[in-house]
């Protein structure tokens, strides 16, 4: 019922030339994918990525968006600017932004609204840190991030909003949540959505897993009931590896 979505998050990697090279190599390998295929690239690579992905099933996303229409926000990018570049998706509230750049649930909420207003699909990231997990706070943290971050959004907005559950301790560490753990936690997120928003949202929201997802663990993760896709960092930088993950069901 829910269409899977496999998205690469390139983070601060790849020049324009490398972008073109990677997408040209990737396109023929993912052309028969059954899932949505997305690459979220640095702002400076968006135009090159759009050009390289033209005529393919690869959609291009950004990694952040500001909530204001315009103004004195040095270094920020507005939703209209992204819309002009015909970006389809934007990552919001990634743990690296929460950790290093002061992102909060409130700013996540505002950025998500700005993306939706511009008809760009937000990929909203949530996830607990290692110490929160050790202190048994995982569910509490996730509930707060979902309820506050997505406050005010209606059922129809969840046709566009994608949620990415990324346990912070699993990002770039080679440690993955077990497929069962990830499934259980995403199942919990569905319960929060059903209880705090509307019961249909728990069923219809697309929720990805992210955190050291790779060619070895993707099939098991993708076989889980509640997991609708992946948000992939390191393994999305190589066309072969990313294509393997995209073709998880072949
Ligand atoms: P890794 O796949 O490198 O662990 O990164 C996950 C991530 O942060 C995707 O947004």
Image (tube, helix red, strand yellow):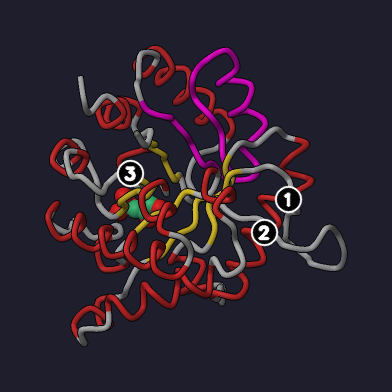
User: Which quadrant is the C terminus positioned in?
Assistant: top left
- Mark 2 vs mark 3: give the one in front: 2
- Horizontally, residue 18 falls left or right of residue 47, namely left
| Residue placed most toward the observer, 86 or 3 | 3
- Residue at the farthest front position: 199
Is 51 in the magenta? yes
* Residue for point 45% across, 44% down: 10
Q: Cβ–Cβ below 8 Å for labels 1 and 2?
A: yes
Could you say where residue 54 lies in the image, as x and y percent from the top left? 60, 17
- Mark 1 vs mark 3: give the one in front: 1
Residue 219, compared with residue 187, is above or below; it is above
Is 250 in the magenta? no
Label located before the other in sequence (2 or 3): 2
The residues bearing labels 2 and 3 have C-alpha atoms spaced at a distance of 23 Å
Could you say where residue 68 lies in the image, as x and y percent from the top left? 79, 63
Determine the secondary structure under disc 3: strand
User: Which quadrant is the N terminus positioned in?
Assistant: top left
* Residue for point 50% across, 30% down: 18
Label located before the other in sequence (1 or 3): 1
- Horizontally, residue 10 falls left or right of residue 35, namely right
Quickly name the residue at label 3.
230
Point out the stretch of residues depicted in magenta. 35-61
Q: Residues within 10 Å of mark 2 (few under 14, many from 20)?
A: many
Quickly name the residue at label 2.
113
Could you say where residue 226 lies in the image, as x and y percent from the top left? 25, 49
The residues bearing labels 1 and 2 have C-alpha atoms spaced at a distance of 6 Å
Determine the secondary structure under disc 2: helix
* Residue for point 38% across, 74% down: 143
Quickly name the residue at label 1.
117
Figure disc tally: 3
Determine the secondary structure under disc 1: helix
């Amino acid at each position: 019922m829910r269409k899977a979505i496999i998205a690469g998050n390139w983070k601060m990697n790849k020049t324009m030339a490398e972008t073109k090279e990677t997408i040209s190599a990737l396109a023929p390998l993912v052309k028969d994918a059954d899932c949505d295929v997305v690459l979220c690239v640095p702002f400076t690579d968006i135009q090159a990525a759009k050009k390289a992905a033209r005529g393919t099933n690869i959609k291009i996303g950004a990694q952040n968006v500001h909530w204001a229409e315009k103004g004195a926000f040095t270094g920020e990018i507005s939703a209209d600017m992204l819309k002009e570049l015909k970006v389809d998706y934007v990552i919001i509230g990634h743990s690296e932004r929460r950790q290093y750049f002061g992102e909060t649930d409130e700013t996540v909420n505002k950025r998500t609204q700005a993306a939706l207003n511009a008809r760009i699909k937000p990929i909203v990231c949530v996830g607990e840190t290692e110490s929160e997990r050790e202190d048994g706070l995982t569910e509490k943290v996730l509930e707060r991030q979902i309820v506050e971050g997505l406050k005010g959004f209606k059922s129809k907005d969840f046709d566009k909003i994608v949620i990415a559950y990324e346990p912070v301790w699993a990002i770039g560490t080679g440690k993955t949540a077990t497929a069962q753990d990830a499934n259980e936690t995403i199942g919990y997120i569905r319960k929060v959505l059903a209880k705090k928003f509307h019961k249909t949202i728990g069923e219809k929201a697309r929720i990805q897993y992210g955190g050291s997802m790779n060619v070895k663990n993707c099939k098991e993760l993708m076989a889980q009931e509640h997991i609708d896709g992946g948000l992939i960092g390191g393994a999305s930088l190589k066309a072969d590896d990313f294509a393997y993950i995209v073709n998880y069901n072949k």
